[in-house]
Amino acid sequence: MKCQILHESEGRLRVHLCGKRMSCRQADILEAWLVATDGVISVKVYDRTGDAAVCYVGTRDGVIAAFASFSYEKAERLVTVPEHTAREMNREYEEKLVMRVVVHGLKKLFLPKIVRVALAWLHAARFICKGAALLLRGRLEVPVLDATAVTASLLRGDHKTASSVMFLLGVGELLEEWTHKRGVDDLASAMSLGVERVWVKLPDGTEVLESVSAVQPGDRIVVRAGGMIPLDGKVVLGEAEVNQASMTGEALAVHKASGSYVYAGTAVEAGECVVAVDKASGEGRYDRIVRSIEESERLKSAVESRSEHLADRLVPWSFAATGLTYLLTRSVTKAIAILMVDFSCALKLSMPLSVLSAMREALSHGLSVKGGRFMEAIAEADTVVFDKTGTLTHAEPRVVAVVPFGGREEPELLRLAACLEEHFPHTIAGAVVRAAKERGLDHEERHSKVDYVVAHGIASEIEGVHAVIGSRHFVFEDEGCRIPAGEAERFEALPDEYSHLYLALDGELAAVILIEDPVRAEAADAIARLRELGLSHIVMMTGDSERTAAAVAKKLGIDEYRAEVLPEDKARFVREAREAGHTVIMVGDGINDSPALSEADVGVAISTGAAIAREIADVTVSEDDLYAFVTLRRLSEALMWRIRGNYRAIMSFNLALILLGVLGVLPPATGALLHNGSTVAIGLRSMTKLLDT
Amino acid sequence: MSWSKLAVFAGGVLFGTAGIKALGSRDAKKAYTQVTAAALRAKNCVMDATTKVREGAEDVYEDAKRINAERAAAEDAAVIEDQA
């Protein structure tokens, strides 16, 4: 495409695309195209002007060639353009923000005074209603202060101050709304990229694994415990307890039987059901994710964010100072001057800006955070609980060996195990299935019905034989299986450094599958760094045996571990730690981690894990690297540091303004200018990057 | 009753009947549409101008950063390394 270079410096080009107006979609395409070009570090496309700024390393020829060979049609074919970007929303909010400023300026310049006063009163009515409503409930918070300040200055005939205070408050509110939408949007686009797969039941009864997007209305899909119902539909077979919290906010599971309607985005807690699909994927999928995130935010917002409290706590003091000044000086003007220096607008402006930029920065490190208060909790946390599999280890365990018992054949046992485990969305299960595939052991679905117990294992009937597979606890204690006579010694001699998976047929141990799940290379170092960052209490949880767990914990430098834990134990441990006064971060990836994830102050999910864990978690890590978690902690601490620093700066600066004003050193107009100037300066500083790297 | 008050009253009656008609007429609506379109165009102009200013500011900022990086590099180059 024909382009013109508008500005050039070493390593940076700003180029105008000659052509018609650029739509948001086209801007996205151009951005995706340029990002995919070799040597390009960062790209910014300005859709309004049709310009693009590119930072690159190496020669400029590559970038020039990328522009020259660009066309929308070609780029759309060659690179993947994200379905949804925040561009349109950002554009809308930018517009709103600029228009507010412009309208405010125009009003000041052109409207006659009487109209401005009338408008100011009209505008103030909203603030007064809000303040009065809070006061009636006996709460002295920021809106009360806002309302008092605005009303007082209006009553004194100072509509100028009143309208500029209201203007700043309005801008702060808008920025807050933008922050929130932006966070949800970023997260939703990250989540909607993950491809979900479902079991589709063919008319002849066999089940095949397919991508959700391939499912047509009328198809039948099978959803089992721990799985997400990916599409709307009607239950035609089976019964299930469905958690609809993502739709209704109701935490208790709802019983669904044949004929009931189930909704996309809800999760099956227990049982299994066959669903006749009603609507194909793509219809409202993105909106569903956005809705579910918003819901989970709303549900959790009972824990009020402390940054809001910072501003609220100041309110009584402001009122007290106003009263005191009046008593001492007998001057209404000076007393009201204190109300006028509104701490809250600087606080309200800088908080959302700090949080917005921190969330965006987190996203650039592959971390989607569902809300600012989670970063706060991460910064304050002193305890972190890791579920070993998938977090401390690669989520790719490998089958080392199958040790047969009772004189059975090894390949046949692996085939059986794979056949059972295929239905279980767990990483260990995946390893067994993979091992069978690698050895060319194809299996047809031979068992009649899978009924499984989350985390312990699976029980099923295969050609009339009762087969169970799972942990030691499940196989030997719950199911009462025994070791074949004369083989106890062999059983005891099994090596300890591997995780064991037990397969039993008709109540007798048939095989022990040895699974190796190597810890991540960076795990020990990352844990040491977390400890340096003040996380004093690092706990590992695993379903492995005591001896295996001890060996791993020692290797990683973890001081506390829990072996042979069940999902409810994980949640209980988290709850107990919280009751003991700790702030707890839970890191996990599987279905069995879900209760613990929602129990913790912050649940962190590794995004390669189960869908339900991602849905429940407050933070998802898309990078397959434990250092990302270290970055998260550093980022959160830096954010809190900045928020506290802003708080102190705003407090001391404005306090000085008040004092100088009361003493009569500073004329009110200069005071107001300095106040607003400092608000903007702190706001701008809040948008800069938190971490150097 | 003075004549002027009567005139104001008559004017009010006239506005209440003919005036409202005129304000709601099809031609008036056309005028409103034109004015609204002009306002929207003005808004777009403002937004485009804002974007231009931002682009310019970013150019200046990036160049300024580069100047500082070059200065720092020059200062580093002026240091004689300790080889003892």
Image: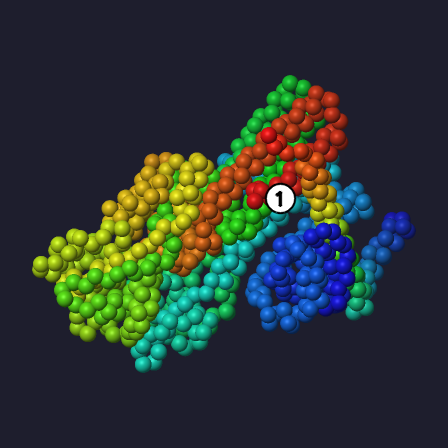
Does A605 sit above or below residue A664?
below
The one of A68 and A272 positioned closer to us in this rendering? A68
Category of crowding for the residue at label 1, using alpha-carbon neighbours closer than 10 angstroms: few (below 14), some (14–19), many (at least 20): some
Q: Label 1 is placed on what type of residue?
A: Met
Quarter containing the N terminus of chain A? bottom right
Residue shown at 44% from the left, 70% from the top: A212
The furthest residue to the left = A485
The furthest residue to the right = B3
Coordinates of residue A550 in the picture (x, y in percent): 28, 44
Residue A109 falls in image quadrant: top right
Residue A22 falls in image quadrant: bottom right
The furthest residue to the front = B84
Residue shown at 35% from the left, 40% from the top: A557
Residue shown at 42% from the left, 47% from the top: A522
Does A345 sit above or below residue A592?
above
Residue shown at 53% from the left, 39% from the top: A638
The one of A232 and A103 positioned closer to us in this rendering? A232
Coordinates of residue B70 in the picture (x, y in percent): 71, 42
Is residue A505 visible to us here? yes
Left or right, residue A273 beside residue A137:
left
Does A536 sit above or below residue A408?
above
Quarter containing the C terminus of chain A? top right
The furthest residue to the top = A328
Residue bearing the label numbered 1: A687
Does A107 sit above or below residue A44?
above
Coordinates of residue A125 in the picture (x, y in percent): 64, 44
Mark 1 element type: loop
Left or right, residue A589 beside residue A156:
left
Count of marks, rendered view: 1
Left or right, residue A346 beside residue B24:
left
Coordinates of residue A279 in the picture (x, y in percent): 45, 72
